[in-house]
Each structure stands twice: as C-alpha cells, then as structure tokens.
Amino acid sequence: MAAKPKKTASSPAPEAAEVAPATETTTPPPSPPEAAEAPPLDERGRALIELLDHKRGDRRMAAAIVIAELQIGGPAVLDALRKAVRRFDDPTLRRYGAEAIAAIGSRTIVQDLRPLLKDPEPEVRDTAKRILSSGKGVTLDDLKDMLSQKDDRQKTSAIAVLGALSGPAARRLLLEQLEDDSQRVVDAARDALRPMLSDASGIDALEAVEEIQSLAEERRLSTKASFALAVIDLLGHVPNEGAADVLTAISAMGGLSLEVRTAALQTVRRVIQGKKPSQKVFRFLLEILEAGHPAALLGPAADALTGIEVPLALEPRVRALTTSEQAVARRWSLRALGTLDTAPAAKAIAKAVEAGDATDREVALETALLTASGKSALAKLLTTMTDEAKARLVANALKKTATTLLPAALHTLESAVLEVPPGISQLILEVLKQVGGGSTGKAQETLLDSAHRAKKKGQWHDAVELYKRLAQGNINDAEARFQQGLCELKLSRRLLSRGGKSNEPCILTFHSLIRARDFPLIERLKSERLTAEELYFLGFSLAEHSEAAQGLGGDILTLVAESDEDPKLRQMAHNKLVTMGFTE
C-alpha cells in the first residue's frame, strides 16, 4: 500500500471561488533558478518522472506520493509535477502532486498551485488552500504581485490565499481590494475577510474596526454603493462594540443613499443583538424615531432597538413616542415599555389601549400583561371605561392572567362594581370570576346587598341598575335577572295598564328567563306577591310577544284567573286564556 504524503501544517481555509477546470494545454510558468544546485537526477528520479505520466492512474498517484515522502527535488521533477497538477482528467493526481510540490519546497509554490485554487474538485481546492495557507514558500510580495495584475482570476486566487493566511497584513491587503472596479474581486475580498474578522478578538478586533473605519469616509462611501455596502457588511462581522459606533456614523451621513444608510442600521442590529449597547448607540437610534424622517430609516432603527433594555434615564423619551405620528415609533415604544415594570411605563401603555388605533391597542394589551404594573394599570383602566367594546378587550386580556393580579388591582376591581356602568360591571365580574377565591363572591354580595336595599326602599330604578350588573354577560345570574325584571315591572306598570308594549324592558327581561330552564319562574312570581294588575299585564304582554313566550304568558294569566283579588281582571285573564286555547 502506498504511503500517504506528508501534509503541511495549516488551518482550514475558506472556499475559493468556483472556476473552470485546469486543462492539459495550460503552459506552466518557467522555473526560476533554485537557490542551490540540485543533485544530478538519478535513475530513480527519472523513473518517477516517467511514472507521473503513466497511463494508469494508480501508478501516477504512487509516483507523486513517493516524491513527497522522499522529497526528491530538482528542476526536472518540479516541471513534471507542474504538468501533473494540470491534468484535467486526474483530480487525485492533482491533489497528490500539490502535496509533492509543497514537500520539495518549491520557491514558486504560489504560481505552481494558484490554478488549483479554482479547481472544479473541492478536495483539490482545499488541498491547495491548505498548503498555501501554511505560509511555506508563500510571500506577501508574491500575492501583491498577483493583486497588481489586471486579470481577475489572478486577483481572486491571491485573495483566496490571503484569506487562508489570515493575520493583520493579509487583512489590510484584502481591505484594499474593496475599492476594486471588479465586483467579482470585491465579493471575493468580502468572502475572505468575513471569517477572518469573525475570529478576531481583543486588540486584533479593535485594530480591524479602526482599519475599516479609515475607509468609511463619506466621500469614498458615496462614490460607489458596492464599496459602501462591503464596508458595512464587514463591520457586522467584527466582534467589537466599536463597530456599532462606526455603523451609526455611516447611517447619519446625509450624502449617502437611503439604501446604504438603511443597510448600516440593519447591520447595527446584528452587531448589538444579544448585547447591551452603549447609551450613545441607543440614543442615536432613538433620535431617528423621534425625528420621524427619513421614513425609510424608521423600520431598521426600530428593529435595531428591539430587544434592548431601555436605560431608565431615557424612559421618559420612550414614553413620549407612544403618541408619535409614526406608527413604527409608537409600536416599538409600547413593546419597549412592556419590559419595564414601572408605574409611568404602565400608565403610558394603558393610555394607548384606550386612545390608540386597533393595532396600537393590540400591541399595548399584549405588552401590558408582561408586568405586574401593566396588569394593574389595565385593571384601573377597566374601571374608568365607558366604551363596552373596548372594555371587553381589556377584560379579556386581564382574564388571561387574572390569577396573577396583585391584591391592590383586585381591590380596585371589587370596589368599582357599584360605580361603573352595568356593562362594565359585568366585565369586571367576569375577570374576578377568573381569579377565583373570594373575589367574585365578595363583589357579587356587595351588589346584591345594595340592590336588595334599593328594592326594599322602592328605589326601582337604582335597583334595576344594580341587578343588571349581575344579570348580563357571562355571569348571567338568573335570580338577579328575575329581580331586575320585577323592578322594571314596577317602573312600567302604568304604561302597561294603558295597553302594554311588548318591547318594554320588563317584558324583554322575563322573556330572556325562558332560556333558564331550571329557574322556577312561576313559583318565584307567587312568592313576590305581585298585584293581580301587574301579573295580568305581564302575562298578557308575554302572550302577545312571541310564540316562545306564549306558554309563559299563559301560565302567568292562569295565576290571575285563579286569584280572588280582582274579579274583573280574573275574568279578563280567563277570556284571554280561552282566546289562546289554554282553556274552554
């Protein structure tokens, strides 16, 4: 089994640009004179040279391996190896031939292996880059010479080698290529620099930022967008906070296109993501949102600020943005305030829930639930609202986290059930119901006691308003609805006595009790000791209201027909029952 060639020490290099395969017709560069006279080629050397061109591929490969192992040099051997690495039909020979050239220490190794950096076979390209990146036989002068050529292929090959070599000198040479007229060269330089910059640390990273900053003059950046975008992209790969400062400076250059300034802001986000940027950077981005123009920069600035903790010293300015004319600024500020568990931040969020547009309201509700202060502010807001549609949104949000409401917030809700409009009171009770424990019971008992006292005093209107708080929405207390209907009947009695209207509140309330199947409505009416007149007109109106209510109306009229209180009404009730077919 043939021995494996020795490999030069190196680190993995970035992928070279894809190129056309080498061909047999490629003329190898002339061999310069060696530093020392090579020993005369013996029979073994001549045999190996012949084997490099053998018709069998395994023989060719074995010859290259032996040359590398024994380090057999000389002009004739080197020329044979140059031809071997240019055989388009044998990628294995190209790879082992490159190893052999490296092993014998060719002074022209850059020129010898340069074509392999564009080889169509990845293994061959990797071998060439690994050898060249070792630095053996490679000088910066060689690479500078290649970069000075007009041929893009030579430039991109040199760039690939520089990327493999790495180091400050290589980095500086690569940065110079960013202003090349060829986009292909610029792209190759960027590809080579990215991993080099990403691996930099400490002083090396700081120096990299300073070197790139020296290129970031407004005059130079405004000349060519591709150059400006390359500079911005590379700053995004340097793990140094100074990169963010340079990027914000670029985005502030009014002479640059919006495309370039936007790219700078987008890269700022990449640089500071997951880190705590300086207040200088935060303040700069905040000022873009405050200024409100140019509009194209607002989104990138807000994106860059997203996820960054708001410095307490700048919180008032962030709160002020909740009323900005720019939707992007408003919604960023609402999300940012949601990370602060402070009363002023929570108050600003709650105000946006009440006064903002639909999207602002949605964002504000979402962020308010993130902190205890935010939820308390929502609870307080619910007790002051009059728009039931908006109030329901707030109540639904609070129900999601009702069990985490602070005692003070619960007390605010419990205390408000008597003072707010009935619809809002219902929503509060729904929230308290989600809390569980004694909150709902305490609020309901308060309402019932007040309602019963008002009813007992004949304060029918006040009693109706209080019972409504327990008889609507998801609470839907049937007893409270019944009591509400009784009080409404007292208020409507005289109107009913003049003919009755089926749309009277009491009729609608009693009609709704038909759905409460387990509620003993007739028995409860008996226990209330209503007058025959009240019962008659309630029964009559229900019988005329709808088919579903006719049965209930007939049952109530039966109570009147069986009563001894008023003979005239008793006869009238009987007549109506006959008309309805309830009796003969």
Image (cartoon, helix red, strand yellow):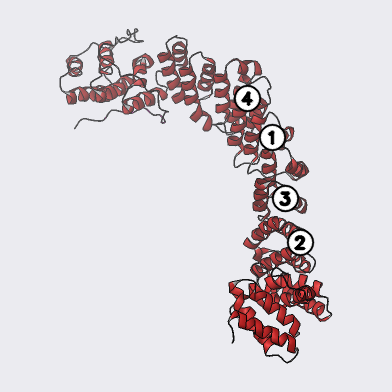
The secondary structure type at the circle numbered 1 is helix
Amino acid residing under circle 2: Thr
Q: Residue at x 62, y 79 (%)?
A: 552
Point out the frontmost of discs 2 and 4: 2
Image coords of residue 299 (percent x, y): 63, 35
Query: Residue farthest to the left?
Result: 55
Dot placed on the residue nearer the N-terminal end, 1 or 3? 1
The secondary structure type at the circle numbered 4 is helix
**What is the C-alpha distance between the residues marked 2 and 4?**
47 Å
Assess disc 1: are there few (<14), some (14-19) or many (≥20) residues with their C-alpha within 10 Å of its C-alpha: many
Dot placed on the residue nearer the N-terminal end, 3 or 2? 3
Amino acid residing under circle 1: Leu
Dot placed on the residue nearer the N-terminal end, 2 or 1? 1
Assess disc 2: are there few (<14), some (14-19) or many (≥20) residues with their C-alpha within 10 Å of its C-alpha: many
Q: Which residue is mark 1?
A: 285
Magenta range? 3-15
Dot placed on the residue nearer the N-terminal end, 4 or 3? 4
Q: Residue at x 15, y 19 (%)?
A: 55
- Residue 383 numbered mark, or none: 2
- Residue 258 numbered mark, or none: 4
Q: Which residue is mark 3?
A: 349
Dot placed on the residue nearer the N-terminal end, 1 or 4? 4
